[in-house]
Amino acid sequence: MKTHRNPWGDAVVGWGALSALGAWLRTVPAPRRVFFLVDENTHEACLSLVHPEVPDGCAVEVLEVPAGESSKEPEMALSLWEALREHGAHRDDVLIAVGGGMVTDLGGFVAATYKRGMRYAAVPTSLLAMVDASVGGKSGVNLAGLKNAVGTFYRAEGVFVDPIFLETLPSREVAAGWAEMIKHAYLDGGEHWNTIGQFAVAEADTMERLIQLSVAFKARLVEQDPEDRSGVRAALNAGHTVGHALEALAWTDVSEEQLNDLAPDSLATSGAAPEPLLHGEAVAAGLWMESWVAEARGLQPAADANALRSLVRAYFARVPLPSMEAAWTVMQHDKKNRTDEVRMALLQAPGSSVVLAAVTKAECAEAWEAYAKTFV
Ligand SMILES: NC(=O)c1ccc[n+]([C@@H]2O[C@H](COP(=O)([O-])OP(=O)(O)OC[C@H]3O[C@@H](n4cnc5c(N)ncnc54)[C@H](O)[C@@H]3O)[C@@H](O)[C@H]2O)c1
C-alpha cells in the first residue's frame, strides 16, 4: 500500500486499503455514526466489503441513490440533506461515499454542504473514480444538463483505493477508466509510461502498481494547483476537446449496430442495455485524434504519437462518429475557448506538459478522417 498526499485528502492506494479505512474510523472521536452513500450497484457489489471495517458500537445508515449520472442532480442532493436531517445526522458523523465518480462527486458535495461540512471519506469503486474522480477535492452536481455546474472543493479525511472492487466492475467501465490512466501515464512519462505500454489487463499486481502511479500523478498536479486556477491541471484536458464533443453527440444517430460494436468482445459486458458512449471511451478517441493533430503540428514526436495511438487502438473499438461539422460546432463551445476558435490541450513528448493551442477546422478534419480509416 502507498499513501499519496494532496491538500484535498490523502489517498491510501493498494490491496488492503480498506483496512486503512477501519483504522481511520477507529480514530474518529465519539459520537460516531457512519452514513454510507451508495448507488444500487455499489450497494449490491461493494458495500459488504466495506461494512466490516466499521468499528463495533458505531451505528450505520445506508443512503442509496439510483445508479447513473442522472442522480448527480441538485434534487438528489436535497433529498440526501433531508435524509441526513431525518436521521439526526451531526457534522461530526461520517459520510462515506462508496461508488464510482457519480457517487463520490455527489457524496463530497452533500458532505461539504450539510451543516457546513460533515466528516467525509471516499471509497472509490470504479477505475475512473480510483485514479481521477476521488482525487483532487472536486465535488458537485450537474444543473439543467450543464456538467458539474454547482459544486465545491472539499477535503476528504481519507480516500481508500482498493483494487478489490475491480472484480465486479463491468469490463466496459474498466476500459473507460483505462483511458484516463493512459493519459496520466503519457503525461507523467518515464516508468509510468513504459509500464502501461507493456501491460495486459489481467495482470492484477501490475494493475495495482499502475493505479498507484496514476493516483500519484494526479495528486502531484493537484498539489501544484489545488483549486485548478494556475493552469497546471489543464494538462488533464488532453483528449477532452474532441472527447466532450463525441460524448455530447453520442445520443443522436447511434445505430444498434454501432452500439454493439462499441466494446471489443474481450471488453463486452452482458446484462443491462449499453450506454451509447462512456466518458472514457470518448476520451480515448479524443486522445487518438488530438494526437494526430499534435503530431502534424510537430509538437508530438512521431514515435511517441504512434505508441500512444497504438495503445488506444489496442484497447478501444471505434466510437459512433457524428459528422465533423456537428462536432466542430460543439467544440467551439468548449470551456477552454475564449472566442469561437477551438482550443485543444495538445501533447508533446511523454513527461512534458501540453500546449494549449487553437486548432483549425482543416486540421481537425484530417484527424477525423484518419480515425475513421483506422478504426473500421
Ligand atoms: N471530481 C472529479 O475530479 C472528477 C473527475 C472525473 C470524473 N468525475 C465524475 O465522475 C463521474 C463518472 O464516474 P464513473 O465513470 O465512475 O461513473 P459512475 O459512478 O456512474 O459508475 C459507473 C457504473 O459502474 C457502477 N459501478 C461502480 N463501481 C462498481 C463496482 N465495483 N462493481 C460494480 N459496478 C460498479 C456504477 O453503479 C455505475 O453503474 C462523472 O459524474 C464525472 O463528472 C469527477
Image: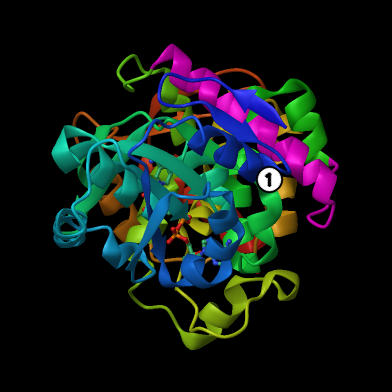
Q: Please give left or right for residue 120 compared with residue 280 in the image.
A: left
Q: Residue 356's image quarter?
A: top left
Q: Is residue 280 above or below residue 357?
A: below
Amino acid marked by disc 1? Arg
Residue 153 visible? The answer is yes
> Is residue 254 inside the magenta stretch?
no
How far across and down, in percent of the image, does residue 120 sit? 36, 38
At a point 54% along the width and 18% down the height, the residue shown is: 220
At a point 83% along the width and 52% down the height, the residue shown is: 200
Please name whichever residue, 198 or 342, is drawn nearer the observer in this view of the structure: 198
Q: Please give left or right for residue 190 compared with residue 291 in the image.
A: right
Residue carrying label 1: 309
Please name whichever residue, 284 or 104, is drawn nearer the observer in this view of the structure: 104
Q: Is residue 240 above or below residue 275?
A: above
Please name whichever residue, 226 or 230, is drawn nearer the observer in this view of the structure: 226
Start and end of the magenta stretch? 198-225
Count of numbered marks: 1
Q: Please give left or right for residue 332 compared with residue 175 in the image.
A: left
Residue closest to the far front: 57
Q: Quadrant of the N terminus?
A: top right
Q: Few, some or many C-alpha atoms within 10 Å of disc 1 (few <14, some 14-19, many ≥20)?
A: many
How far across and down, in percent of the image, does residue 149 sit? 19, 45
